[in-house]
Image (cartoon, helix red, strand yellow):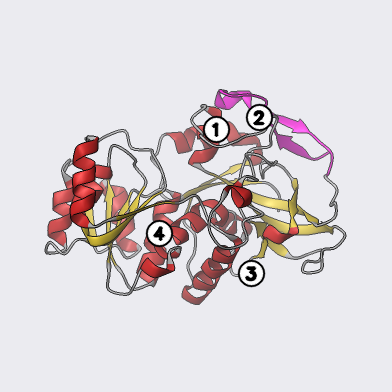
Amino acid sequence: MPVQYRVEKIPAEFDEIKLQQCEIPKAKAGYVVIKLQAASTNFRDMAILKGMYPLPLKFPVVPGSDGAGHIVEVGEDVEKWKVGDYVSCNFFPFYIDGKSIPERTYKALGGTMDGCFQEYVAVPAVGVVKLPESLSPIQASTLPCAGLTAWNALFGDKSKALQPGQNVLIQGTGGVSIFALQFAVAAGANVTVTSSSKEKLEFAKKLGARRLINYRETPQWGQKALELTNNEGYHHVVEVGGKKTFKQSLQCLAPGGVITSIGFIASEGEEANFDEFISMLLHKGATIRGIFVGSTTQYEDMLKCIEANDIKPVVAKVFPLQELKDAYEFQWQQKHIGNIVLKISD
């Protein structure tokens, strides 16, 4: 019988999530069933277990928002897809296009819907996207959350989308950050990457980052980042740290620049008080975007960029499905570069 992980309650330790036997789901009207070959882990999965996740959840739930595989069953009223198609599903299956509003984002894989840490998943056909054959399931499984979040950060607001020659600052070298680096380089931007690791910074350089900052060696990295642009500042900052890094992000931002907030993982840094924060915000004329993944239309746009530029997702390590606990622990240490993947089937 096929197997799946289930989260029964939170908070929960990583080793409390066990594999269980299950039935293969049926494709009801408007749905397809995907036989998954790979799924990737994200910080959000662990935040759910630790009770840190602020959005609605259902219990029990199969965790995991990202997966790739082939369709094995098509429900009634589904005309676009057929058995054998190589696909994945958007993080928010009913968020097709337009603004991110609750009606479109309430249903989320691994949160309010069963997700991808299982062998078979039933998903709404409207949220399915066709994957390029140039990407393996291991690579493609990293796209729905990490890839699409990075794409939305740089190109989601069309009025302020990244342009060639602009300066971009990206914090860290996790899944989202590495995708953001790859997309920004493909767009012809000048990219600065921050990290606490010389090894990670060297890897970012190989991917096209022009400027590197070790924030462990330079705690006031905002000023350093600004100086690296001859005080022009950054048109886009991909902000993954949260309250511990926002002050530095604002400091290095160009006038009228955009900070896209996608996370809250930083453990080091100085918090700005509210008055100081507002003063810097007004002085810069800054735009702060809070985003959470993206739409299916954005997903399809991202895939066009990936194919046109032959972008290959960076995978730090692959674990068997049975070793989810080890994958979580590896990711929680934040020592990896890129994405962490569970291999489910051949």
User: Nearest the camera: 157 or 89?
Assistant: 157
User: Nearest the camera: 59 or 6?
Assistant: 59
Element marked by disc 4: helix
Residue ID for mark 2:
7
Question: How many C-alpha atoms fall within 10 Å of the one at disc 1: few (<14), some, or many (≥20)?
Answer: many
Instruction: Report the mark closest to the observer, 3 or 2.
Output: 2
Using the rendered view, name the quadrant where residue 231 is placed. bottom left
Where residue 52 sits in the image (x, y, percent)?
Answer: 48, 30
Residue ID for mark 3:
133
Residue ID for mark 4:
180
Residue at point 71%, 60% (across, down): 126
Alpha carbon of mark 2 to alpha carbon of mark 4: how far?
30 Å
Element marked by disc 3: loop
Residue 23 lies in the magenta-colored region: yes
- Please determine whether, in this image, residue 66 is positioned above or below residue 268: below
First in sequence: mark 3 or mark 4? Answer: 3
Residue at point 79%, 55% (across, down): 31
- Please determine whether, in this image, residue 236 is positioned above or below residue 122: below
Question: How many C-alpha atoms fall within 10 Å of the one at disc 2: few (<14), some, or many (≥20)?
Answer: many
Q: Quick check: marks 3 and 4 in contact, CB under 8 Å?
A: no
First in sequence: mark 2 or mark 1? Answer: 2
First in sequence: mark 3 or mark 2? Answer: 2
Amino acid type at mark 2: Val
Q: What are the residue bounds of the magenta stretch? A: 1-24
Residue at point 46%, 56% (across, down): 314
